[in-house]
Amino acid sequence: MLAACHRSESLPPEAWTVSDYASAGLDIAKPWTADDHAKAQRTLAAVTRDHRERLPRFNGAKSGAVFAKLLEDPPDDASSPVDARLLGHLARFDALKETAKLYSTDALAPPPREWIELMGHDLLQAAVLEHDADTFIASLGPDDPKHANRLAEQEQMSGGFATMIVGGLLVADQLQLADDDRVTMLGYVTAALPAIYPRAKPELQVQIREIIEKQAAGFPSGSLRFAAEAARRALPPQR
């Protein structure tokens, strides 16, 4: 297994404790709403500018609890209007994506584990958004004057989500990453596949299937092979 220290992009030692983040406005003791997650992203962007040592770390001794809060989804109230749920998940999706950018400043370097966790949870949000968008559009009915525009926007959104799946698979291909990080990325991809793959354009479906088939056949036996085979099983049967 490749050690994490072999990564091209590494983070400096963590500097802040939970109390430091609380002083900056990140109170992890209370439940967070989607708006709180968006506020946390903006706060982290401000306090970590030129101070990457202040980024909370996955399982970090000082800041692990703060990072875990970034991954914690707000309670989902099924009784709330579908448009409110959709907007909440969109806010959560954007917050995760923008927070992940703080951890990976070199697009050509293998990402740190924190980026993998954040983008993995973003894939899970994308899967929820696929369902919410369907429910929202259906609730308006075919006579909605913006029906065609909404369908076009949903198609564009679905294409972006499918591209994220491809990106996650390519991260899992990176030999510079620890096996555990690659397996984790594949796990998130696998969880999101059933909701995202069927809505992808045919050319992206072909690309996704080809990458997964190659990984399932080519990864060495062990956790990586098992994770790739799980992703292959999550694909719908070919027609």
Image (tube, rainbow, N blue to C red):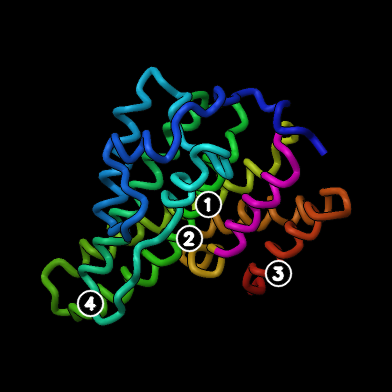
Q: Residue placed farthest to the front in the image?
A: 19
CB within 8 Å, label 1 to label 2: yes
Residue, disc 3: 233
Residue found 52% across the figure and 37% down from its top = 62
Residue in the foreground of this view, choosing between 206 and 132: 132
Question: Mark 2 falls on what kind of element?
Answer: helix
| Residue 49 vertical placement versus 85 (above, below) | above
Disc 2 residue type?
A: Leu
Residue, disc 1: 120
Q: Which mark is residue 124?
A: 2
Q: Main secondary structure of the magenta part?
A: helix
The image shows a total of numbered marks equal to 4
Residue found 55% across the figure and 69% down from its top = 194
Q: Position of residue 35 (x, y in %)?
A: 24, 53
Q: Position of residue 29 (x, y in %)?
A: 35, 54
Q: Which mark is residue 80?
A: 4
Question: Mark 3 falls on what kind of element?
Answer: helix
- Image quadrant occupied by the N terminus: top right
Near mark 3 (Cα within 10 A), the count class, few <14, some 14-19 or many ≥20, is few
